[in-house]
Image: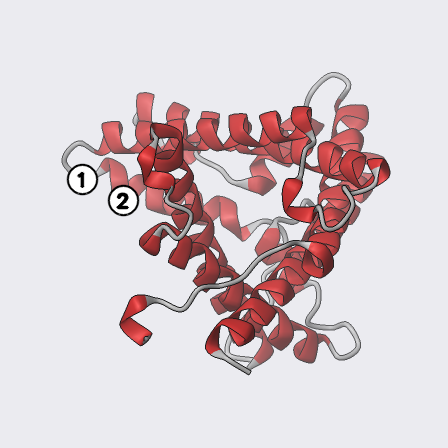
Amino acid sequence: MTYSDRMTLFARIGFAARGLVYILIGWFALDVASTGGEVKDNQGALGSMVDAPLGHVLLAICALGFAGYAIWRLTEAAMDPENCSRTLKGKFKRVGYAMSGISHVILAVAAARLALRQTSAQQGSPGDASAESWSAWVLSQPGGVFLLVLVGLILFAAAATQAIKAYKAEFHELDGDTPAPDYVRWIGRCGYAARALIFALIGWFIISAALNHDPDQAGGLGEALKQLRAQEEGTIILGVVAFGLGLFGVFSLIEARYRRMRVAKPDSLR
């Protein structure tokens, strides 16, 4: 098995791991909508696996998958195998790849540490505290307000990209000899729409923290779900979004099996 074959396999496992995590997030969010339980983000969902049967084995597989997915995205960001840099849209696409790669490195480390019992399981949404912490650090740097606003705008751009993807529902990366079935496209459409809303909310939290010089206003996935629950029709809104996040997990599992992809070997390793 070549380097590209191995890393492509790991990237597919990464899609499957992402799918499992989003299904758990959606399930827990539905519980919050119906019973007022505890919101969980990505790391909280990983923590919930610790006490499950074969939980540490599953976490180890997730860690490998997230690492493979991260290498794939970071390779695309650094090496630009699709020649995205020819257009401004392509440049933003590479930034998105880099951010996705970094976030999955963090998830890989978190899953690996849980699998190796090097840390205790974190419940709830630890990502909110992390967002507040790094926002405080950024604001303390020269030009910190500008940098934090820029991060928020990048998240808005990512939200817009996913909203457009939900609207168009093309998903050419799943097309083989025949186009993907309509029901698969609807699963992806609903999943990306829910994710777009979450990204937009997180971007708004970051920009609010920057403009008000208050890192406590920053937040992640958990804070976004809490804000949805706090609205007047929060139970319904959160329930719909939770269902969409769960469908995004299902769509990720479909991508793990059917997406056309190949992780190129970096030039430095050839």
Q: In the image, residue 98 lies at what x, y percent? A: 39, 49
Q: In the image, residue 121 lies at what x, y percent? A: 60, 67
Residue 183 can be seen in this image: yes
Identify the residue at image location x=47%, y=25%.
Answer: 204
Q: Which residue is mark 2?
A: 137
Q: Relative to 229, is 183 on the left or the right?
A: right
Spot the residue most to the left. 142
Q: CA distance from mark 1 to mark 2?
A: 7 Å
Spot the residue most to the top. 232
Q: Is residue 268 above or below residue 220?
A: below
Q: Which mark is residue 23?
A: none
Name the image quarter holding residue 59: bottom right
Q: Quadrant of the C terminus?
A: bottom left
Q: Give yes or no for contact between labels 1 and 2 (Cβ–Cβ under 8 Å).
A: yes
Q: Relative to 192, is 159 on the left or the right?
A: left
Q: Which mark is residue 141?
A: 1
Identify the residue at image location x=43%, y=43%.
Answer: 131
Q: Is residue 146 above or below residue 252?
A: above
Q: Relative to 5, is 269 on the left or the right?
A: left
> Which element type, helix, strand or loop, lies under badge 2?
helix
Density class for disc 1 (Cα within 10 Å; few <14, some 14-19, many ≥20) is few
Residue 146 vs residue 210, the one in the foreground: 146
Q: Quadrant of the N terminus?
A: bottom right
Q: In the image, what residue type sits under mark 2? A: Trp
Name the image quarter holding residue 49: bottom right
Residue 63 vs residue 232, the one in the foreground: 63
Q: Relative to 260, is 81 on the left or the right?
A: left
Q: Is residue 122 above or below residue 164?
A: below
Color theme of the render: secondary structure
Q: In the image, what residue type sits under mark 1? A: Gln
Q: In the image, residue 96 lies at what x, y percent? A: 43, 41
